[in-house]
Image: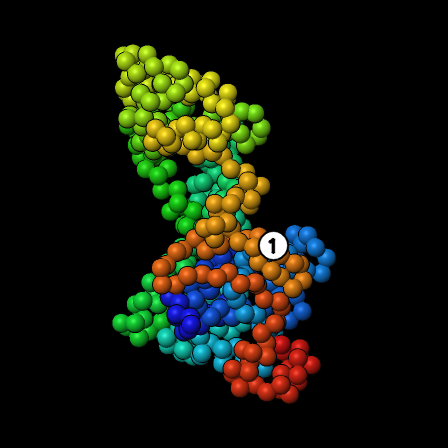
Amino acid sequence: MTELPKALTGVRVLDMTHVQSGPSATQLLAWLGADVIKLEAPGRGDITRSQLRDLPGADSLYFTMLNCNKRSITLNMKTGQGKHIFERLVTRSDILVENFGPGVVDRFGYPWETLEALNPRLIYASIKGFGPGRYADFKAYEVIAQAMGGSMATTGFEEGPPTATGAQIGDSGTGIHLVAAVLAALYQRTESGRGQRVQVAMQEAVLNLCRVKLRDQQRLVHGPLREYPNEHFGDDVPRSGNASGGGQPGWAVRCAPGGPNDYIYVIVQPQGWRPLTELIGRPELAEDEGWATPEARLPKLDKMFALVEEWTERHSKWEVMDALNAHDIPCGPILSTRELIADTTLAELGAVVEVEHPDRGSFKTVGSPLRLSDSPVDVTRPPLLGEHNKEVYGELGYSDEQLSGLRGIGVI
């Protein structure tokens, strides 16, 4: 049976990205069916091939989990022949993605104007740390983006220091934003016939994800934020621990047997209060004027969740989850990384997949979270460095003899 085309079948991506923010974006494009050609420096390639390496001589999990479903070629962009080959690749590509430091691609001799002249239909997509202005030339990393985008100032507990989140909202979060912009530009090209420049800044992507905190900053002008558990409010939105930060109060409460991740997050909606009081053995609180309404409970959320915790501490988080869901009370057990990687439901969904690798054996990685009925994703292994030189350069018309010569003088 002939395999159906994928959503981005026929779209070629020249992937000049490295580390995490860019590769996370191009991997999503590859999962959607694009032909993603990862362009790497000869000899070393993407620095993450060797960073955090757990097996000698094998690409690290850092690299393998961000570069599935791609092809790899090597090219020395500092040589004249390398530049010539690069230009040929640009003319045959739909999208070029890079996340070098500010000005690096320009210094190679390829500002947007040059790339646009080579291929007017090219979508040239970049991830930078910051937009134009004071911060433009600063280097950015994951947690720097969290620091300067509003995340760290609003994460953690009231008396504690600013805290980074384990979710890579600076890197992979920016990559997802870039994919949205690239797909929009690709769609616009169907009408305009022209490519365009696409740029996403890590600081702005984190800021977008923190927009509710900007909402609360403006609400703070009119008085304390009542849904926050904090006792004191200053001029800035405070760190609020595990408070939901939304219209319905929530908190992480401890469960048996009391390990570091034996917690469940519980949200108390108005309609869930009565069944919750019955579950915790305090049904009288459903009628008590001091507890019966959301307005009555709001000033003492800490006491409310302490009552809930007295019940949850006697049960495992899985038992609590089943009991609460039986009454349609929103909740979620805190799942550790060990539990996630072994979760059978996630494996059945394809959210966690096992991939075979020629050097390191099998490893587990995330599957595509984007589910299209007509474009299913089969996660395939990441490429070895330069594995597809012969294949891709052969498509450009280079013979085996020519490739051998280019390899001998360090061009590929």
Whether residue 120 is visible, yes or no, is yes
The image quarter in which residue 151 lies? top left
Along the viewing direction, whichever of 166 and 315 lies nearer the viewer? 315
Q: In the drawing, does residue 270 fall left or right of residue 92? A: left
Picture residue at 55% right of the left edge, 40% below the top: 339
Which colour scheme appears in the figure? rainbow
Q: In the drawing, does residue 22 fall left or right of residue 232? A: right
Q: Secondary structure at mark 1?
A: strand
The image quarter in which residue 400 lies? bottom right
Which percent across, then down, holds residue 127? Answer: 46, 59
Q: Is 355 placed above or below 203 here?
A: below
Number of numbered discs: 1
Picture residue at 39% right of the left edge, 70% below the top: 5
Mark 1, Cα crowd under 10 Å, few <14 / some 14-19 / many 20+, is some
Which percent across, then down, holds residue 407? Answer: 66, 79
Whether residue 170 is visible, yes or no, is no
Q: Is 20 placed above or below 404 here?
A: above
Q: Is 298 placed above or below 335 here?
A: above
The quarter of the image holding the N terminus is bottom left
The quarter of the image holding the C terminus is bottom right
Picture residue at 57% right of the left edge, 85% below the top: 398
Q: In the drawing, does residue 387 fall left or right of residue 178? A: right
Along the viewing direction, whichever of 152 and 47 lies nearer the viewer? 47
Residue most extreme to the right: 56
Which percent across, then down, holds residue 343? Answer: 52, 43
Which percent across, then down, holds residue 402? Answer: 62, 87
Say which amino acid is labelled 1.
Phe
Q: Is 254 placed above or below 288 here?
A: below
User: Label 1: which residue?
Assistant: 363
